[in-house]
Image (cartoon, rainbow, N blue to C red):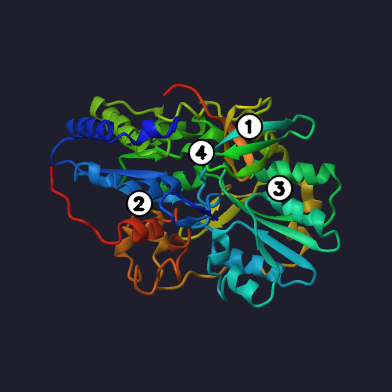
């Protein structure tokens, strides 16, 4: 479960919510990365689907797995 | 915040709202379905429907992964959870979905070892920490979540993890959309396409909607301006006589999707001949199961489960809500017998469920001025 900005409790995984995170460190051999959410929370993220990734990159993470690079045009 | 603030700009929102107003024909009613529960949540949270003309109606589709799980499937999970030596793991909202004899949360209170996890990888970690226990992960969700389960299964097999298995209830988005389009009691003018599912599957799978059914679709992100912009795109297509798949969420969704994710899903999963959806019944080729190569990690092979179909409670109208036939507040038990604290139907469980979203952010129907 996670609290959103309004404080309501909901499961972001069930809700198909993807969270933007910043890559801090990469373990290329295991295809894992330590990432930081905007609220400061750290999480180990599976990055096999978006590899290669580098520190400071922004990823879209769902259920502990990065599904896309966050970027592109506005 | 980059990629957030830009999409919550009130002035821009009013400008898009004005353009939408200029695209609609007075006297014509437009019915658009947002497929994804995340969109439903955003629409209610930000009051997006209040920025639309009264003759543009948003109806809520079957895209909440919790809401579409039938009661019998919950019973199957509880049956596994009660077996000796089992640690049963699942996502948070799934704990509260009622089965025919209670929820996973109630089974936990009754003594079953049921734990909430944030990801399949968390469940695998629990298996490693408890080598003398059988750890089962209840996998739910659309194509957004399925790659995560697939990667975890590949990892578990590569590491030779023998006490870990998955009860796979993943579903796919295209078959229910086709079923909805074939439904005689539903007339839709267009679709707001799912953003995060499309990150994985891309835009191509939705081409059948304009090609076979003549309806426009715009894949959208989840910020208020994303959704308003997608509505504008759909209405502009209608106004200009066009009908195609447009991608409003280009900053994340590639047209071809995430090819690696599709590959790993194809390796680990295969389509079930049919799968039961809450309120929608059995839909062909709409559910995933583990492929034969991963059978040793399949909880449905490893454990005995009842596998009994259970009818929804008579008072519950989740099916009509999921098909967009009725609005949440039109359900007989909405907000009275069925609340987020004590849900009867699954649409009231997850905050992405149409009923819970409406209960939390809207609650009652509001009259709007007719254009």
Residue at (35% x, 50% y) in the render: B45
- Name the image quarter holding the N terminus of chain A: bottom right
Relative to B201, does residue B345 appear above or below in the rendering? below
Measure the alpha-carbon separation of dots 4 and 2. 29 Å
Q: Chain of mark 1?
A: A
Look at the numbered discs 1 and 4 and tell me whether their residues touch, using CB distance below 8 Å. no
Which residue was labeled with disc 4?
B196
Question: Mark 3: which secondary structure?
Answer: helix
Residue A23 is labelled as 1
Measure the alpha-carbon separation of dots 2 and 1. 48 Å
Label 4 vs 2, first from the N-terminus: 2
Which residue was labeled with disc 3?
B121
Mark whose residue sits in front, 4 or 2:
4
Q: Is residue B240 left or right of residue B317?
A: left
> Whole-percent x and y of residue B338?
40, 70
Measure the alpha-carbon separation of dots 1 and 4. 20 Å
Callouts 2 and 3 in the same chain: yes
Residue A14 is labelled as none
Q: How many other residues sit within 10 Å of disc 4, few (<14), some (14-19) or many (≥20)?
A: many
Residue B215 shows in this picture = no
């Amino acid at each position: 479960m996670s609290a959103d900005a309004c404080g309501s409790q909901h499961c972001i995984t069930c809700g198909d919510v993807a969270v933007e995170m910043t890559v801090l460190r990469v373990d290329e051999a295991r295809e894992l990365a330590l990432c930081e959410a905007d609220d400061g929370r750290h999480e180990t993220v599976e990055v096999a689907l978006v590899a290669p990734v580098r520190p400071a990159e922004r990823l879209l993470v769902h259920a502990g797995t990065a599904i896309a690079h966050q970027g592109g045009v506005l | 915040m980059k990629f957030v603030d830009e999409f919550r700009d009130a002035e821009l929102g009013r400008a898009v709202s004005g353009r939408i107003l200029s695209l609609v024909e007075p006297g014509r009613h437009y019915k658009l379905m947002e497929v994804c529960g995340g969109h439903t949540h955003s629409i209610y949270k930000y009051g997006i429907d209040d920025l639309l003309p009264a003759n543009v109606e948003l109806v809520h589709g079957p895209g909440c992964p919790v809401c579409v799980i039938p009661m019998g499937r919950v019973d199957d999970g509880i049956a596994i959870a009660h077996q000796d030596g089992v640690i049963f793991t699942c996502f948070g909202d799934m704990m509260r979905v009622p089965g025919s004899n209670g929820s996973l949360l109630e089974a936990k209170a009754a003594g079953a070892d049921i734990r909430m996890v944030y990801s399949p990888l968390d469940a695998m970690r629990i298996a490693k920490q408890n080598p003398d226990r059988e750890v089962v992960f209840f996998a739910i969700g659309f194509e957004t979540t399925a790659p995560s389960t697939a990667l975890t299964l590949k990892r578990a097999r590569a590491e030779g993890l023998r006490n870990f298995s998955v009860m796979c209830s993943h579903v796919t988005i295209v078959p229910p959309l086709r079923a909805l389009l074939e439904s005689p009691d539903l007339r839709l003018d267009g679709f707001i396409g799912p953003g995060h599912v499309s990150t994985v599957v891309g835009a191509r799978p939705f081409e059948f909607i304009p090609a076979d059914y003549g309806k426009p679709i715009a894949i959208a992100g989840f910020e208020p301006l994303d959704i308003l912009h997608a509505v504008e795109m759909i209405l502009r297509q209608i106004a200009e006589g066009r009908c195609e798949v447009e991608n409003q969420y280009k900053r994340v969704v590639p047209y071809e999707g995430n090819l690696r994710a599709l590959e790993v899903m194809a390796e680990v999963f295969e389509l079930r001949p049919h799968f039961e959806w809450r309120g929608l019944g059995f839909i062909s080729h709409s559910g995933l199961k583990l492929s034969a190569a991963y059978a040793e990690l399949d909880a449905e092979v490893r454990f005995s489960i009842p596998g009994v179909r259970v009818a929804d409670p008579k008072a519950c109208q989740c099916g009509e809500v999921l098909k967009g036939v009725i609005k949440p507040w039109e359900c007989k038990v909405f907000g009275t017998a069925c609340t987020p604290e004590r849900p009867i139907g699954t649409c009231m469980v997850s905050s992405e469920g149409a009923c819970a979203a409406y209960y939390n952010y809207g609650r009652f129907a509001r009259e709007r001025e007719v254009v």
